[in-house]
Image (cartoon, grey):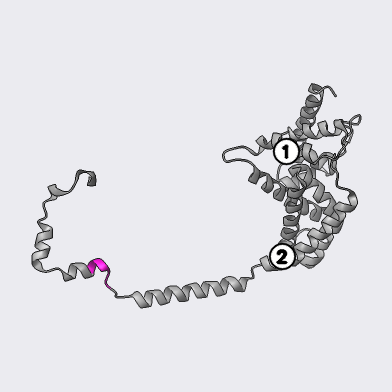
Amino acid sequence: MKSANDILQQASSVYGKRLYWHIRRLVVSHDDAEDALQETFIKIFTKAQSFKGEEGAALEAWCYKIATNEALQVLRKRVHAFQSLDSIGPELADFLAAEAAPGADKSALLFQKAILGLSTQQRVVFNLRYYDELSYTQIAAITGKSEGSLRTNYHYAVENIKEYLKEHAL
Amino acid sequence: MKEFENIVTDLPYKESPEYVESLVKSCASVASAQAPAKVVRPWFYAFAGVAAAAVIGLGVFLFKGRTSPMDSFLASLTDDEVTLIADWPITDIPEYYY
């Protein structure tokens, strides 16, 4: 059985960069992403003994699950009382404008805005599937949703993005 | 992925891969240094439980048999005073008490 240090080492060296970008795509702000990544690594370390899965895919899904929860936790702190997490899109779009690289491609920015307009559930599924190229089985392990509903989420996410891009003449 | 092939889907952020790599290493080393302080061992719960039980037990032992301030007050009253209180005209109580 691996020690907590070994598991943290593997998680950070193998999945670290992907976890950062996964969190960043969800929270948009770099500072928030850094905080969430830090918390993710602390959780991985402290809960390493409770990780019963095999290495590889299971460890990857477990790390992604923790990272997703931490990212959503950051977003929950941003929404006001009685507001839905899905209502945070416009605020994140403002972050996007502020944090984009100078001279960033306009279509790339528009694409990200389209993603930020999705519901949180669709956004998580779309990012994991499109950018991280995870299988629906892995995404199901991360989100706790059935593969069928994830396929539906992804389908509607793609449709919504296409519609947004069409409306904005791209 | 087949979708959005004709669109730039790269992330528009300025952080370079090298920067992200060093950030990840830094976060991991900070996490491994910070985390042990956050790990609460089972013996800590056992110790805290015994300490709490001892404090409660001591409190019960010290205060056991003590009369409350109200009991002391009532015991100090003479028969006349008790009668006076018992005969207090209830109509004198202001309305807002109801």
Residue located at (83% from left, 55% from top): B23
Question: Dot 2, how many residues are within 10 Å of its Cα: few (below 14), some (14-19), or many (20+)?
Answer: some
Distance from disc 2 to disc 1, alpha carbons, whole Å, reads 30 Å
Tell me where residue A42 appears, x and y as whole percent: 73, 60
Q: Mark 2 sits on what residue?
A: B35
Residue at (71% x, 42% y) in the render: A145
* Residues drawn in magenta: B67-71
| Frontmost residue, A146 versus B37 | B37
- Is B69 covered by the magenta stretch? yes
Hey, what amino acid is under mark 1? Answer: Leu
Please say if the residues under marks 2 and 1 sit with CB atoms less than 8 Å apart. Answer: no
Task: Name the residue rendered at 29%, 75% in the picture.
Answer: B65
Magenta span dominant secondary structure:
helix
Q: Residue drawn 75% across and 51% down?
A: A67
Q: Which residue is mark 1?
A: A92
Instruction: Please name whichever residue, A103 or A41, is drawn nearer the observer in this view of the structure.
Output: A103
Q: Where is residue A34 shown, x and y percent of the image?
A: 76, 52
Where disc 2 sits, the SS reads: helix
